[in-house]
């Protein structure tokens, strides 16, 4: 952690990492090495600013940050909530906006209304559990899936799903709809608690600068 004065960032591979790098570039924090799409390199360094970046699968970002392998992470709020790691959430980056929702066929509305014991398929079993058990006090059976969760109600695996809705087109194209909203989502910056203590000034300055850019864009 903060090895030889470097601050290390773990970024969730894909759209969020691209957006984060775009934002950093606008702020003058560049890492040309990362732009080479053919490169198989995993860690990228900006020697001038003493920053290191690596890309990982989204759900692994909070793990790297909790253990201090990365000082800072950028990942969706969905993953922060699902993984529930010991990290500080310091900033809403304002992009990657979407919603976590309970979705299903219109006919499932009744089942929710009457607190029936239904099956809920989700890539986010912890978020689903928190929502149904702690918030709604409804006993349900939660089934973990790894993707294409909309299939659940279509093939009779579950009555509803808890999943991310962005444009709503996946739901529409499959005859499903939003039945309840669990929470809003967007990209978040998370920080290792020890790094926050050891590198407080540097991290806070960086967060302030990023916040300034994010606010300006909104
Ligand atoms: C996500 C999510 C929905 C879809 C929502 O899936 O799980 O399926 O995007 O987006 P929309 O409202 O704009 O249609 P993703 O593409 O990440 O793949 P997955 O199904 O494998 O999780």
Image: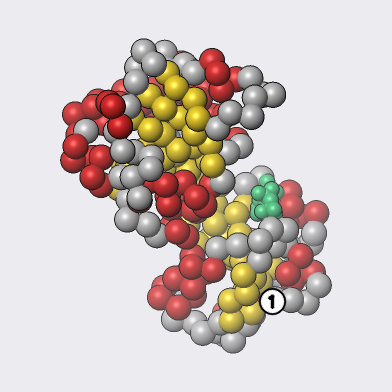
Q: Residue at x 38, y 40 (%)?
A: 70
Q: Quadrant of the N terminus?
A: top left
How dense is the environment of label 1, judged by Cα within 10 Å: few (below 14), some, or many (20 and up)?
A: many
Q: Residue furthest front?
A: 4
Instruction: Describe residue 25's horizontal placement relative to residue 196 as left or right.
Output: right
Q: Which residue is mark 1?
A: 159
Give the percent coordinates (x, y) of residue 175.
79, 62
Instruction: Describe residue 2's horizontal placement relative to residue 70 as left or right.
Output: left
Give the percent coordinates (x, y) of residue 177.
69, 61
| Local secondary structure at mark 1 | loop
Instruction: Describe residue 156's horizontal placement relative to residue 166 as left or right.
Output: right
Give the percent coordinates (x, y) of residue 7.
33, 30
Residue 212 visible in this rendered orientation of the protein: no
Quadrant of the image occupied by residue 32:
top right
Q: In this rendering, is residue 86 above or below 145?
A: above
Q: Quadrant of the C terminus?
A: top left
Q: Residue at x 61, y 66 (%)?
A: 122
Counting labels gives 1
Residue 209 visible in this rendered orientation of the protein: yes
Q: Is mark 1 within 8 Å of ligand 1?
A: no
Give the percent coordinates (x, y) of residue 206.
30, 26
Q: Residue at x 69, y 24 (%)?
A: 38
């Amino acid at each position: 952690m903060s090895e030889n004065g470097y601050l290390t960032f773990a970024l969730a591979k894909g759209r969020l990492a691209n957006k984060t790098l775009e934002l950093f570039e606008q702020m003058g924090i560049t890492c040309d090495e990362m732009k080479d799409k053919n490169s198989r390199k995993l860690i990228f360094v900006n020697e001038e600013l003493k920053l290191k970046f690596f890309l990982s699968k989204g759900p692994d970002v909070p793990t790297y940050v909790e253990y201090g392998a990365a000082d800072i992470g950028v990942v969706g709020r969905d993953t922060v909530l699902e993984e529930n790691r010991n990290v500080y959430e310091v900033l809403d980056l304002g992009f990657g906006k979407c919603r976590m929702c309970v979705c299903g066929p219109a006919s499932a509305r009744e089942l929710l209304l009457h607190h029936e014991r239904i099956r809920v398929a989700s890539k986010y079993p912890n978020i689903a559990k928190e929502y149904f058990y702690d918030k709604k006090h409804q006993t349900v059976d939660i089934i973990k899936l790894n993707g294409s969760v909309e299939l659940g109600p279509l093939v009779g695996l579950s009555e509803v799903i808890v999943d991310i809705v962005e444009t709503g087109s996946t739901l529409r194209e499959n005859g499903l709809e939003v039945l309840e909203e669990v929470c809003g989502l967007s990209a978040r910056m998370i920080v290792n608690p020890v790094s926050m203590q050891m590198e407080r000034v540097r991290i806070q300055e960086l967060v302030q600068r990023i916040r300034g850019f994010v606010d300006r864009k909104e």
